[in-house]
Amino acid sequence: MKLVETTRRHWQPLRTDIVSKFNALWSNPELGNMEFAASGILCDWLEEHDFKVERGVCGLPTAFRAEAGEGGPAIALLAEYDALPGTDNAAVAHRSGTGRAAGHACGHNLIGPANCGAAIAAALAAREAGLAGRVVVLGTPSEEIVWGKIAMLGLGAFEGIDAILTSHGDYQNGAISRPCQSVMNGEIVFLGESGHGGGTRRRNALDAAELAVQSLERLRAHHFPDASLEHVLRVAGHIPNVTPDEARLWFTARHADFERAKAVFDFAIGVAGQAAEMTGVAFRHQFIAGTRGYLPNDTLAQALHSALELVGPPRWTGEGRDFMRALAKACRPEGDFTLDDGIRLHTEGLDPYGQDDGEASWRIPLGRVNWAFPEQVPLHNWALTALSGHEASHPGPLMASEALAIAAVRLLADPAVIETAKAELTGRVGGKALGEPAFGALETMRHRPGSFWNASWVE
Ligand SMILES: [Zn+2]
């Protein structure tokens, strides 16, 4: 219990800093691989607390690796800090955004500071207690396109890490040991020929893209009824009287099983190729990244659950609840207001989303804490941007931060738990060959990430 007290004593004074960084990141939402301000703020903060920080690790300008302590084991906390396009909003209980700018609609402005705060407290407590081992922070950009951690895994940034701890907002409080979807993600570029839209119909890139979309959804329903394919058309022409000479179809395949997600993805590229052929346009596929869903780890989930029980559920204020109630009403006028205010260990079910730390969880034991948002406020919606900029959202990630710090220190004090977690991972993977982490777009993300986001990238 002494270790827990020491850790909490170090965590408490960091609370103000954590909250100020929640707000600093929220006020300046940055898209994936362009999180220059956010990663800088977190690196500076870690350096102030004697972490050795390597900025721009793996040649990725907004990635970093920070370390405190000596020897093994090494516990890594993951910092995420990217925003989502088209989800801007003020921190108010009604829609005020343009839908054209970026916003923190997944609350990653909360994850980076909460997890870094946990690492700082854990490092201070471990030093005071004279524990061997290292606390590491991996600054992982561009989570929203499931890219950053995949690239960093492939480029060696996770080397020497024995266990990973992280957190995310969701609709429940507690440690998570359940799978989520695997994701494959790429963009197809159709290239035709422009001309007067009123004249002879030329090789129309938009025709190819639309034909591909229609065929894909119909065929997916037959061949892969248990998978999902989502898409956007990022480039689809400018004006009806100029035949579009370029169309860009960005699509994502999801399935619980990674091999199945890859099969859907390959199928989609094949169909797109046929659509291009039928319409006489050229076609190119640019791979972004793919990730496995979470590999559950009961050992680490149990370690986190026991830390969460000491910390207790999020301490929402009356004003905070009022704000969330108003936001819930704005999103679902007919619905009730439901907010999980307990703590449980979640082991059942399958989460509908995919995240890039899923791939890491198959290679290094990973434990995750979730905190709850109101059920009526959808993730990736303007309302979540509003919430993550309001103090009503702070108690959840603060709970996670303190619990992560306690769990990290306990793991350093009792490395046998890490060995058990590793053995559990080995047992669950069952000798399956995982292959290299799947990602593309490296040159784009290193040198011209803006071209990715304005849909002009060529890899
Ligand atoms: Zn997220």
Image (tube, rainbow, N blue to C red):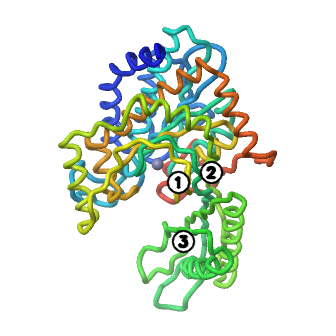
Question: Cβ(mark 3) to ligand 1 < 8 Å?
Answer: no
Mark 2 close to ligand 1, CB under 8 Å = no
Within 10 angstroms of label 2, few (less than 14), some, or many (20 or more) residues? some
User: In this figure, which residue is indicated by the disc labeled 3?
Assistant: 247
Q: Are marks 2 and 1 in contact (CB under 8 Å)?
A: yes
Q: Position of residue 191 (x, y in %)?
A: 60, 72
Q: Which residue is mark 1?
A: 452
- Sequence-wise, the earlier of marks 2 and 3 is 3
Q: Which residue is mark 2?
A: 441
Considering the numbered disc 2 on the image, is that residue within a helix, a strand or a loop? loop
Residue at x 18%, y 43% (from the top left corner): 319
Amino acid beneath label 1: Phe
Splitting the image into 4 quarters, where does residue 313 fall?
top left
- Residue 48 in view, yes or no: no
Q: Earlier in the sequence, mark 1 or mark 3?
A: 3
Which quadrant of the rendered structure holds the C terminus? bottom right
Q: Secondary structure at mark 1?
A: helix
Q: Amino acid at mark 3?
A: Ala
Q: Please identify the quarter of the rendering in which residue 36 is found.
A: top left
- Residue at image location 36% in from the left, 49% down from the top: 340
Q: Look at 45% across and 19% down and name the residue there.
A: 4
Residue 206 placement, left or right of 258? left
Left/right placement of residue 222 relative to residue 209 reads right
State how far apart marks 2 and 1 are (Cα): 9 Å
The image shows residue 318, relative to residue 241, as above or below, that is: above
Residue 193: x and y in percent read: 58, 77
Badge 3: few (under 14), some or many (20 or more) residues near its Cα, within 10 Å?
many
Name the residue at 47% across, 86% down: 197
Q: Which mark is residue 33?
A: none
Upstream in sequence: badge 2 or badge 1: 2
